[in-house]
Image (spheres, coloured by chain):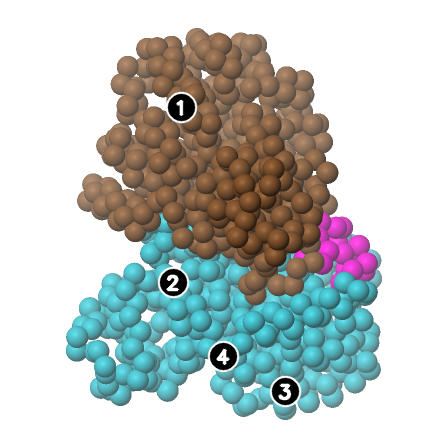
Chain colours: A cyan, B brown
């Protein structure tokens, strides 16, 4: 491949490949063609290169790294950001979130909220997300519009919801969703999301998991989020939550268990044995006082873990840099061990780990020849990022989302020099403010 | 006072006064004259105002609030930011930080590091800091240059240090420091900092505390940071650390106890009785796995608490917005109570609480007529800050330092529209990079 046949060339800066070997390349040359990384060389000679590709990106002063992977969120909930905080979980859910969702969630709200959420995510370095909410088709359509890589998960719960008033037609809903989204775009992966062991019957869980297996797609579930979930499931089924799911035969290596704050050694043994993946959402679980997942122990046992923000109603942002900082720190202090969750470990969770959680490890999560070009540039020429001894430390402990300068997803530049190229951000903010005005009027 | 006699007028936006009554004023008019807030009105009429003052600041789309107060830091340690992370405390200190300090700390390093740290602090909304490091005079001089409000604390420890090779001449050092800084500027308050109960003898503690009392200035000490500090002090003096200090008679309402991660009910009873103030530094204590201070319980007991970042070697930034987010979340999850450390509580700690900790409550910490004009504007017109239901929630849970748009300290505009007006930031970064290059060469 000649350099001048590339669509995009990136030169200069420091490349964190996040490959298995964690190679770091100074002044690299990265060539992208048809959405794929076709060359990664050391000592990229900008003079040879200049003018060679259609798009040339000078990464001097930048760290170049794989785009961040947010393994769990509910994007339209940005419309509820900061609406109700510092409340007990059940008062928050039953007194504020559920009533607001029942009244205000519709296709337009999902679209407007998702568009704003995607602006926030791209501006803070995320290139891939896994979402579960109502009207999930709208979220897929918005991802196509903005160019983000998405795992969109059709939700299932045993009561009527906005967009799914008849909860009994689950299998038909599942089949229709996959038929709609299979092969629409290499950027979109459909998935199924059963809400939780306490809101889904054994029949719902097994039916939807069977459909997911048939389609070969990921199956997600909120699991072991709160302390009292275990008691509820024990009372109802005579088993702890993970054991309950295991006895139903729904756990496997295409299962993504979200939260797992109260996973005990027995639960972790099941996850490790079956290859269950875990999505860790520290900020949301801390803010809701739900608990701290035993991630260092899970990693020790070889369980694949990724990071997620959860929705903006419980976080209250979608910034994966803040999530990394929190993940690194909260486990150190709760274990009283400053060596756990090192900066490279956390950065892996936010890139290659997250890709593996979502079943996309062969395509994204590192910058290597043959992988899809999901790449971000961080502007390191700022006081809070100076001096620079160790790139991993700097990204996890000092950088913030706003340091993201440029973002490429599947070979398409979606942000350049902080300018979003696929989203009218002022319009997106205006539309969500109008929704919030409606909500405030009640 | 006529509006056109003001030096600065701020109009529009939303004002969080952070006064006792926590008043919020929409579209205020704030007038500043000779560094003092001379008027705060509702419904500021921009038409009457325009052209009235020397400087007119349009705060439309902004939150206006008191500048943040960082109650504990070691500014020049930005030079060691990210140099050594994810290590056990003693390996970090003895293997990396202390050797680097012994070799590389000098007046020039302190100046260069402090200048960069001040750029970082102003860019992230801090207007007042309390610092303790070597060559503290240099830190005072740099504050005069940049216009920041500073409590500069001369340090004392029972072994030779850079800038203070003869540790026996403590009293003379203390007297000279206060003589140098008393009445130099209303922005500068001198203070004394005894390092800790395990590095300062009873004689050092009582001598320096007596000098602080004579001068009427704050006296600081690192206290109860790590679990094993209690054991060390028990073994040496037969009392727990706070009891040890109490028995020496050095605790009072001009004492600032930094960290207090392992404060037990007896310690808190002493603090409450004597009016001891507490500086809470959650990010540093989490990253070093030192512990989590029982701040919700301290607040319940009426102890005055402020927030601090600690130095950038253990944080690794000086961003008080990140510190607020962490403070709000870590206590919720460790107490499993989502109602503790509410957003308004945390924002008070970072403003009026911090001012009270530093003995500056009569001058800063809120926006009220008669107070010094330490004011920041936050640009809320951003995706991650949209929509806006609750200003306190938005600032604590979603905002970051980079959202600070404009900063005024003592009536002087030190940053306008993200442009630093008192610091050459490129030069500051360049100089600290040169120091880091020296350190890396070893």
C-beta proximity under 8 Å, tags 3 and 1: no
Q: Secondary structure at mark 3?
A: helix
**Label drawn at residue A378:** 2
C-beta proximity under 8 Å, tags 2 and 1: no
The residue that label 3 is drawn on is A178
Measure the C-alpha gap from mark 2 to mark 4.
19 Å
Q: Secondary structure at mark 1?
A: loop
The residue that label 4 is drawn on is A422
C-beta proximity under 8 Å, tags 3 and 4: no
Numbered disc in front, either 2 or 4: 4
Q: Is residue B313 above or below residue A281?
A: above
- Residue A430 x, y percent position in the rendering: 63, 71
**Residue in view at x 17 percent, y 78 percent:** A48
- Residue B270 placement: quadrant: top right
Measure the C-alpha gap from mark 2 to mark 1.
42 Å
Q: Secondary structure at mark 4?
A: loop
Circle nearer the N terminus (3, 4): 3
Q: In the picture, which quadrant includes the N terminus of chain B?
A: top right
The residue that label 1 is drawn on is B184
**Depth order, front residue of A63/B427:** B427
**Residue in view at x 40 percent, y 53 percent:** B419
Chain ID of residue with mark 2: A
**Depth order, front residue of A199/A240:** A199
Numbered disc in front, either 3 or 4: 4
- Residue A74 x, y percent position in the rendering: 64, 69
């Amino acid at each position: 491949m000649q350099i001048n046949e590339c669509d995009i060339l990136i030169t200069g800066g420091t490349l964190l490949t996040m490959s298995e070997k964690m190679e770091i390349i100074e002044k690299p040359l990265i060539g992208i063609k048809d959405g794929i990384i076709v060359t990664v060389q050391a000592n990229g000679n900008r003079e040879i290169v200049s003018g060679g590709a259609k798009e040339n990106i000078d990464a001097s002063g930048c760290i170049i790294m794989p785009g961040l992977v947010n393994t769990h969120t509910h994007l339209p909930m940005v419309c509820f950001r900061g609406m109700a905080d510092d409340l007990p979980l059940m008062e928050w859910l039953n007194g504020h979130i559920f009533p607001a969702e029942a009244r205000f969630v519709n296709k337009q709200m999902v679209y407007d909220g998702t568009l704003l959420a995607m602006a926030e995510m791209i501006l803070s370095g995320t290139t891939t997300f896994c979402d579960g909410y109502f009207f999930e088709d709208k979220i897929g359509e918005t991802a196509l519009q903005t160019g983000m890589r998405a795992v969109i998960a059709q939700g299932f719960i045993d009561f009527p919801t906005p967009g799914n008033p008849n909860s009994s037609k689950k299998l038909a809903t599942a089949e229709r969703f996959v038929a709609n989204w299979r092969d629409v775009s290499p950027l979109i992966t459909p998935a199924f999301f059963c809400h939780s062991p306490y809101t889904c019957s054994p029949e719902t869980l097994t039916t939807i998991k069977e459909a997911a297996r048939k389609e070969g797609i990921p199956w997600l579930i909120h699991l072991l989020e709160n302390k009292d979930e275990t008691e509820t499931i024990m009372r109802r089924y005579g088993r702890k939550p993970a054991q309950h799911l295991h006895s139903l035969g729904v756990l496997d290596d295409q299962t993504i268990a979200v939260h797992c704050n109260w996973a005990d050694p027995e639960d972790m043994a099941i996850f490790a044995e079956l290859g269950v993946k875990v999505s860790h959402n520290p900020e949301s679980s801390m803010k809701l006082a739900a608990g701290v997942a035993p991630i260092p122990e899970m990693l020790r046992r070889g369980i694949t873990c990724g990071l997620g923000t959860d929705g903006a109603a419980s976080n209250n942002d979608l910034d994966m840099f803040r999530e990394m900082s929190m993940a690194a720190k909260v486990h150190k202090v709760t274990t009283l061990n400053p060596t756990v969750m090192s900066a490279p470990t956390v950065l892996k969770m936010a890139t290659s780990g997250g890709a593996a959680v979502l079943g996309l490890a062969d395509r994204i999560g590192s910058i290597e020849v043959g992988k899809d070009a999901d790449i971000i540039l961080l502007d390191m020429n700022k006081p809070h990022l100076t001096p620079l001894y160790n790139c991993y430390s700097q990204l996890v402990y000092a950088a913030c989302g706003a340091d993201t300068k440029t973002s490429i997803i599947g070979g398409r530049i979606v942000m350049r020099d902080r300018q979003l190229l696929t989203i009218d951000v002022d319009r997106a903010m205006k539309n969500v403010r109008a929704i919030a005005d409606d909500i405030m009027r009640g």
